[in-house]
Image (spheres, helix red, strand yellow):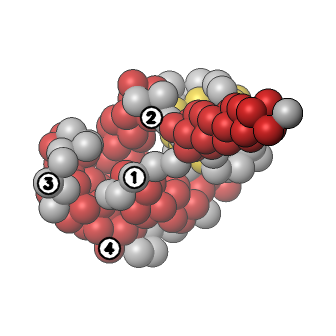
Amino acid sequence: MKITSVATTFLLAVSLLFTASVRAADNALMEPVKSVLDHYLVIQSELAKDSVKGVDEHANAIAKAVKGDGMKMLSPDVAKQAEALAKAKDLKSAREAFKPLSKSLIKYLADNKTGKGAYHEAYCPMVKASWLRKETEIKNPYMGSEMLSCGVLKN
């Protein structure tokens, strides 16, 4: 009787640990990736509002996080793309610079099979470009108020 109880407790503990690790692998992001995505989402939100307010600061923070990552989790291209975005002089150029950054971050999440359920890829057929969102509601950073809800969720 005692052995069965111990075995049951052990199996339950193993099951809980396995379930927790699978969930963590699907949803948890390590630094600096989480920080990069947090800054990215602020940029995405500003562009959707037809604004470049703080875009340079957040883009520079992305570049700094990627460059400072000793584990090299993100490609150095992400830093270069963020720096190009930080140098954008107007809304149009910021939106153009946002495209390759979005593409790289979407690729990172797909390649590493992480962020599922937490980040959603949206696609705008008008500009043939995707971006990431935490919410499922479309707020298009490439079209802003002109066509804020233009796009579809891809995942």
Which numbered disc flags the more N-terminal residue, 3 or 2?
Answer: 3
Using the rendered image of the protein, determine whether residue 96 is visible from the camera's viewpoint: no
**Cα distance, mark 2 to mark 4?**
23 Å
**Cα distance, mark 3 to mark 2?**
19 Å
Mark 1 element type: loop
Which numbered disc flags the more N-terminal residue, 4 or 1?
Answer: 1
Q: Nearer the viewer, mark 4 or mark 1?
A: 1
Q: Is residue 45 above or below residue 116?
A: below
* Disc 2 target residue: 109
Q: Please state the horizontal and vertical placement of residue 7, each as a whole percent of the image.
A: 72, 32
What amino acid is found at the position of numbered circle 3 in the picture?
Gly
Q: Please state the horizontal and vertical placement of residue 12, each as a whole percent of the image.
A: 73, 37
**Cα distance, mark 4 to mark 1?**
22 Å
Q: Are marks 3 and 4 in contact (CB under 8 Å)?
A: no
Q: Residue at x 25, y 62 (%)?
A: 65
Q: Nearer the viewer, mark 2 or mark 4?
A: 2
* Disc 3 target residue: 70
Q: Residue at x 18, y 45 (%)?
A: 72
What amino acid is found at the position of numbered circle 4 in the picture?
Glu
Mark 2 element type: helix
What amino acid is found at the position of numbered circle 1 in the picture?
Met
